[in-house]
Amino acid sequence: MMILGALNLAGQEIEKLVPTLADLNGWKMTSEPQIFIGDNLYDLIDGGADLYLEYGFERVVSAHYADPSLNNIQVEIYEMIDAPSAYGIFSITQQAAEWSKQYGNLSAVKEDYISFWKSKYYVNLSWSSRQHLDEPLLAKLANLIGQKIPDDGSYPDLLQTFQFLDPGKKVIFLKGNLALSNFYYFDYKDIFKIQEALACSQGSHHRIVIKFTDQSKALEILADARQSISNNKRFTDVTMAFQGFSCRDNKGNLILIRQIENYIAILVALDNSISLAPFMDEVTQKIENNPR
Amino acid sequence: MDRRRFIYRGSGLIAGGMLLNLVPLRLFGNIAGHDLCMVKSSDYYKATLRAIHELGGINKYVPHGSSVGFLLNSNFEEPGTYPRPDIALAMLFLCWEAGAREIVMLQMVSKDYWRRSGKFDKHRFIIDELVQIEKNEHPAVFNDKDFRVMETLDGAVHLKNIEIIRKISEVDVFINIPILKHHATTILTGALKNMMGLCTRKTNVTFHLGSGVRNDPEYLGQCIADLNLVRKPDLTVADASEFITGNGPAGPGPLKRLDLVVAGTDPVAIDAFGARCLDMEADDIIAVKRAYELGIGEMDLSKLSVSEIQA
């Protein structure tokens, strides 16, 4: 386990983000902050570390506090490879929560935890056990950490390209197949060879837009994906469609997949009374009107 | 723990039932028995008792005076990520009532976990006497007293040099209590994957990284199947009451509620059912497919006697 030894090697910067007891009158730190680097993340996260590693996890500092009401609070500050990766891990792990701009660039706030991203950091604060519901103290910690992170960092280019910066839209940034599987499951094999993609739910349907280096790559992946889906018994009615194909998943949901320039767009109907075609046209126009 | 006292208490079957103000239990259960039993109820404690009854009663699995090992996936906080304590408490009570000599938590279970149940106080007399393997707490590190190394495992495709809890081969009865829920890498985590709770962190990390390819679900699924060759649980009681269908295993994630407790002796069958809970087929889950191929259990539920009960 990486503890103090690691602090001296690579964790100096992240350690500075941990609120000190001088900042927190009457609080106690119940154990020394621990830093976990790279694959040592498996020592901190009991299941689920793979997803963080897929997003470019670098290191995390974990600290435990007891506040004056004897609430136990756990703080985890994850340093990702860059700000888009921090946005990505926030967006995928908090996809079920409401998002707001209360902390950092975007945050998810519930009764027992606060999560936010800012710059290349993804921050989680939670009550591990609570004697009293005393949320302002959790908020105090979140504000302290947010203030210690000097710059905001930039959203993923893909979000900026498509102008998906409204937190209410909850657009998820994907960097691999684990993340895609966490949003919509096609296959444990990476049939779309995802490097970067956006995903969001629009009520009646899911939208996934995957970016490739060039159009020929997108075409090649589309053909391979069609073959994989045709061979997967979870999917039926695989049919050629304009610049792509359609199929149905095992819930009967219609799926429309289209190659558009260097992108593959995927729409999954959650309500079979709707037509996906107009939505696909909208996505097509958005891609065609934006620079590569 | 005072073992003699524990056996003595275990002998007081009727008294125990009265103490806990429970409906009378027929310890010998349904004579016909089933391979798999699913009980639907929002009273998860009662559902668990009923499921075990349908499987033939606790005495079929837990002989008087036996030592019982529990593997309970309790180390999560978010709703739908850990088995409801009422299910585990019902199993503790049944084992106590059957006269178990000792009940060993093969992976550390904190008091905070039990306190999440409104039945905590009534079961405290059992909880206080549980044997805990305190060193098997995430991230578990090898020590000679609690763990041993299994250099090879008959039939295993990948796994070797497994650092595993000694007690798993010492207890007379092994009861696995998972929740059936989403997992980002394996899609489903249930009975089969819960077995990783018996191993040190070092061993478990090899499941994820051992193939040399990061995020290799094929390798991970095979390792999970291999690990289940160590010992098949005598009983698996899975929580399918409410579980996350995304952002697993830690959540928070979208919740699906079925109000089901699923019990049986075949962990492959239970996970095959778990796949259905996530709108998958059994062979979508690599660990299930590989465990079936290793002969650990049946993944085709149509070949099993399945009892479905509304309690």
Image (spheres, grey):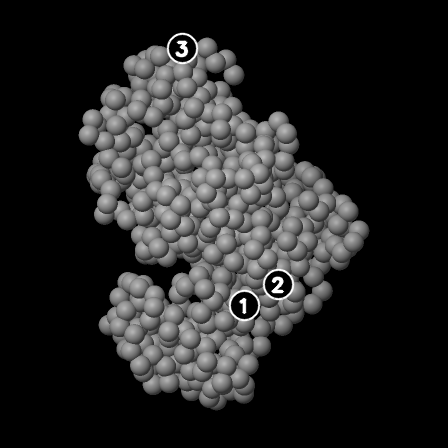
Q: Foreground: B212 or B9? A: B212
Q: How many marks?
A: 3
- Tell me the SS state at disc 3: helix
Any mark on residue A175, and which?
A: 1
Left/right of residue A193 with respect to residue B293 in the rendered view: right
Residue shown at 26%/31% (left/top)?
B55
- Tell me the SS state at disc 2: loop
The amino acid sitting under disc 2 is: Gly
Kindly indicate whether the residue at mark 3 contacts the one at mark 2 (C-beta within 8 angstroms).
no
Instruction: Output the chain of dot 1.
Output: A
Vertical order, A238 against B302 (above or below): below
x and y percent of residue B146 in the render? Answer: 59, 29
Q: Foreground: A9 or A213? A: A213
Left/right of residue B249 with respect to residue A125 in the rendered view: left
Q: How far, Cα to Cα, is label 3 from label 1?
A: 58 Å
Residue shown at 69%/61% (left/top)?
A149
The amino acid sitting under disc 1 is: Lys
Vertical order, A47 against B170 (above or below): below
x and y percent of residue A242 in the render? Answer: 34, 85
Left/right of residue A93 with respect to residue A29 in the rendered view: left
- Which residue is labeled 3 in the image? B8
x and y percent of residue B62 in the render? Answer: 36, 23
Residue shown at 61%/63% (left/top)?
A56
- Which residue is labeled 2 in the image? A56
Q: In the image, are marks 3 and 1 on the same chain?
A: no
Vertical order, B11 against A285 (above or below): above
Kindly indicate whether the residue at mark 1 contacts the one at mark 2 (C-beta within 8 angstroms).
yes
Instruction: Output the chain of dot 3.
Output: B
